[in-house]
Structure formats: C-alpha cells, structure tokens
Amino acid sequence: MQQTTIDVPAHPGTLTPAHAARELGLKREEFDLAVHLGGIRVLPDAGGGGGRRVEQAELDRLRGEPGFPSTLRERVRIVGTAEGAALMGISPGRFTRLARLGFLIPVRFYRNRYRAVVWLYLAHELAQFAARADSGPALTGRTPETLRGQLEAGVDLRARNWRGRHLGLLLRQAPDAWARAGVVAGFLAAVEVADIVPDPYERSYVNRLRVAPPGHAAPGSPSAHLAESLTTAQDPDEIGWLRGELAAEVELARTEKPAPRPDASTGARTGGRRARTAVEQPPPPRGPSGEHPHPAPTRIPRSADSGGSRVTRPGLPRRDYGDRLAVPRRRATPRAQQPDSGAGLPPRGLRAWLRRRSCRATGPGARSEQATRSGR
C-alpha cells in the first residue's frame, strides 16, 4: 500500500518574507521598506535562525484595507529629485534646495555610476507637503534671505535628517535596552563609543549589537565606505546628543540585565559565548629526591676585563681542565728570526714558472702528444 507524505510547515500560520511579498503583490525591496517603515508587522523566527516571519492574520489585515493593493504600493513608492519635483509642481533646483534645508526628508540613498549620492523620497510624503497650506512660500516666490544665506554657507541637512529618521525606525524595532544601545552606537564613531562605554565586555556586547549600514555593498568597496560615512554622525551637536542617548541606554541596560562577561570559576562567558581564559598549568615534575630535573640557570661572573657583566649559563658540572691548562703554550717565533728555508734556490717567481711548466709537461695532453710522436 502506497503511503502519501504530507509536508507540514515548520511554522504554522506564518509565511516567509518572500512568500508574503508575493501574496501582497509587492517587490521584495518594497516589502522590506514597508517593514522598515512599520507598515507590515513581522515576528522573529521562532526556530532561532535570525530570520523574520509574517503571520497570516497580518496578511488578512492588509488585504482588508480599502483600495488594496494600490494603497499599500503607494505608501512605499519612492521617487528621486526629478520625479519628486514634477509631483510637487516645482523645479528640480528648488526641490534640491528644500531638501538641503531640511523641508524634505529622504528615506533611502544609493551611489550612481558617476559616484554621486542619489537621495530618494517617499512619494506620498511629498504630496502631503505640497498640499499643506503653510508650504506655499516654500514652493513659490523668492527664498527668504536667511535661508539663502544658509545655502550659500553650504548647509546640507539631507544626510542628518536621514540618520535621524533611520535611527528612529531602528529603535522602534529593538527588543531591549542593550539592542537600543547597539543601534545608537551604530551612528557613532568607535572612539566615541569607547569613551561612553569604558568597560571592555559591555563595549564588546554593544558593538556586537550594532546595526550594519544599509545597502548590500561588499565590505571594503566604495559603496560600503559611502554608507558608513553617511551613517556616522558628523555635526558636534548631533554627536553630543547621540552620546547622551548611548549613555542613558547603557545605564538602563545595566539595571535590566548585565552584559555577558567571563565567569572566573568555569571560564565561560555568562549569557554569551565562551571566553578565552588562562588555564592554570600544573607544576613541573620533580625527581626522586625532590629536585627539579632541570636546575635553574647559574649566573657565572665574567672576568674583570669584560666590564663586570654577568651572563646566564646552564648549571652544568664543570670539567677539570687543570692538566691541559698547566701545559705552557709555545710562543711563536718572530718572522724575522725564522730560518730562510729557500736559501740557494731560484727566486719565487721563477720557481712558480718552472712548476707550471713541469705540470704541463706531465699532464694528460703531454702524454698523448708523446705517444703520438713515438708512433710516428
């Protein structure tokens, strides 16, 4: 009898993000943006894989909204400068000036092929700003003198406004105080975090909870460097505010739960990974009489002419060189008093010439030549 196998889902009543995006008629990047903005509620993976799941009840809620799916897709539609300016009925130059002055807050950015930063904005937020009654002077007419002075001074609040928005969205998703501290630390330089969190174990735990800069760039690439520079706070007042937030979150986290640190008794990191601790080495073995098999090195003084310095040598038994040292060394005879062993001989150069001639005469070539002559 043939048996039929039925696949039971590991998480009944929930869907993966890719499956939920297809059910809602969204692209994956649109779905991620909706989750980031809080439009779609997700749950952490119960299996501990670090992923996210979407409940079926959440999909039913979104499908029940009036105008689905166009309303949901309109809430996550992003536009650039040209399309945003056309949507608001202004020129691209005025749109850029409004964004630099902080009237329009970007939601994303990317690096184009010309290595320039392109900021993206939510279309429905631009439409709401253009429809406001108090936005008329900003959209039409001459820019006020104070704002023109700021633009001439080089004011550009797009990166700072994006950081503030991104920080708020991440803090809303953080589960506890340590996670919020890691989120805030992600917007500060490493030296600022080390100044606020001096404890090495707490700082390591906070850095482990840091949220990576947005984007899918490879580590070390120009896009990754750009994302890191835009995510790190630059203005002194912004840095001071983030330092205060980090100190407050760490102080609150200490009261809720201490940071993981090594346990002195077991060598394990409490609440985290196993720590690397020094293992106590057993004492070295000793001989039958209680002596160490390798005695400690003995310091032997040098002679007085060596400057009185000491050297360390192994404590080995010294040999008796008394008999050999007692034999007096024979003094070399001066060169001028040596007898001339070459007396009555030709000069040295002539002797060398005669020696080379005798070698040639008795060499292999000479013997073959003599044999040839004798054969003739």
Image (tube, helix red, strand yellow):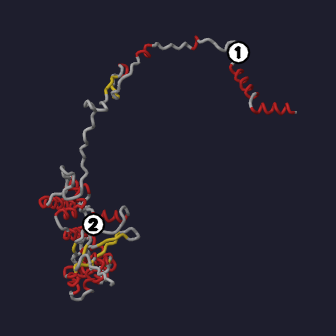
Sequence-wise, which precedes: disc 1 or disc 2? 2
Q: In terms of secondary structure, where does tag 1 sit? A: loop
Task: Please rate how many residues cluster around mark 1, counting C-alpha atoms within 10 Å: few if below 14, some from 14 to 19, many from 20.
Answer: few
Q: Residue furthest bottom?
A: 67
Of residue 176 and residue 183, the one placed in the foreground of this image is 176
| Left-right relation of 44 to 84 | left
Up-down relation of residue 12 to residue 200 (above or below): below
Q: Residue at x 64, y 14 (%)?
A: 341
The type of residue carrying mark 1 is Leu
The type of residue carrying mark 2 is Val
Give the residue number, with chain letter if any, for mark 1.
345
Give the residue number, with chain letter if any, for mark 2.
155
- Tell me the quarter of the image containing the C terminus: top right
Task: Please rate how many residues cluster around mark 2, counting C-alpha atoms within 10 Å: few if below 14, some from 14 to 19, many from 20.
Answer: some
Q: Residue at x 24, y 57 (%)?
A: 273
Of residue 231 and residue 69, the one placed in the foreground of this image is 69
Q: Residue furthest front?
A: 1
Quarter residue 369 falls in? top right
| Left-right relation of 179 to 114 | left
Camera-nearest label, 1 or 2: 1
Up-down relation of residue 187 to residue 112 (above or below): above
Residue 49 percent location from the top left of the image:
27, 69
Quarter residue 65 falls in? bottom left
